[in-house]
Image: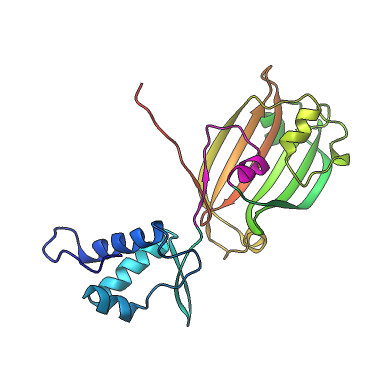
Amino acid sequence: MSALLEKNSPLPLYFQLQESLQVGIESGDWKPGMQIPTEGELCRLYGVSHATVKRALGDLVQQNLLYRIRGKGTFVAEPKIQKDPRKIQSFTEEMRTLGYLVSSRILEARVVPADAVIADRLHVAEGEPITLIRRLRHASDRPITLQSSYVPVALCPNLLQEDLSGSLYEVLRRYGARPERAQEIYSATAVDHMEAELLGVRAGSPVLRCERISRGSNGQVIEYVESVLRGDLYQVTVELTLD
């Protein structure tokens, strides 16, 4: 961490300070959960005003690199989970690959008639029986996402008798329904009160909502999933190339 800021630089001092603090976070000098210097200490260290420090810290809080605890100070946030949408993986497989311990809390598991929206997503007739599974998914004991999965009963008639706490993809493969490709649509919204309570965030906090339709090798839809992903812990990274 450098305490030298370029006073004559065209870059504002708050932005230079922000970049310096970010280097300290990304280099590992400050670990997740570690408290950073106080605003007064940063003012003395960098030779800048309180307004400059407040602006820099505020931007880093907005970026979820820092978080504040009233009466205690400012701390380094946990790094976000990186999602690569080019890979077809279940949540369990994805988190295991990243080194997280995965667990699930089953909120609901039952057979219901497909309404018009779900029938359209699964390409089945309206009213056809489908298995609905709602789960709160954790990565290393942190609630990360709420998932509602829909699978045609005709495809997996005994799904409710299976262990649903792990990867649903693994269960589907045992029924011969191997996911070969999937389409995901993401949108940025806010959580309602029920979702906020389950995810351990404030009502109105930003989340990513994802709709995924998974298909087998013959193009048949084998699963439709609606996910609510914590915006402070999860982000999607896409690598682009020029053809």
Q: Which residue is outermost to the top?
A: 218
Magenta range? 79-98
**Residue found at the far left of this picture:** 8
Query: Compared with residue 160, is residue 135 higher up or lower down, i.e. above or below?
Result: below
Residue 109 vertical position relative to residue 32 in the rendered view, above or below: above
Image point (40%, 72%), residue name: 36
Residue 197 drawn at (x, y percent): 65, 64
- Which residue is nearer to you in this view: 81 or 219? 81
Whether residue 50 appears in this view of the structure is: no
Total number of numbered labels?
A: 0
- 132 sits left or right of 72 in the view: right
Q: Percent x, y for residue 154? A: 83, 27
Residue 236 located left or right of residue 7 = right
Q: Is residue 37 above or below residue 188?
A: below
| Above or below, 200 relative to 88 | below
Report the quarter where the C terminus lies.
top left
Q: Quadrant of the N terminus?
A: bottom left
Res 65 → quadrant: bottom left
Residue at the location (16% across, 63% down)? Answer: 6
Percent from the top left, x then y, of residue 182? Answer: 60, 29
Q: What residue do we see at 36% from left, 67% from top?
A: 58
Instruction: Place residue 97 in its image quadrant.
Output: top right
Q: Position of residue 51 (x, y in %)?
A: 26, 75
The verdict on residue 87 being magenta is yes
Question: Looking at the image, can residue 94 be seen?
Answer: yes
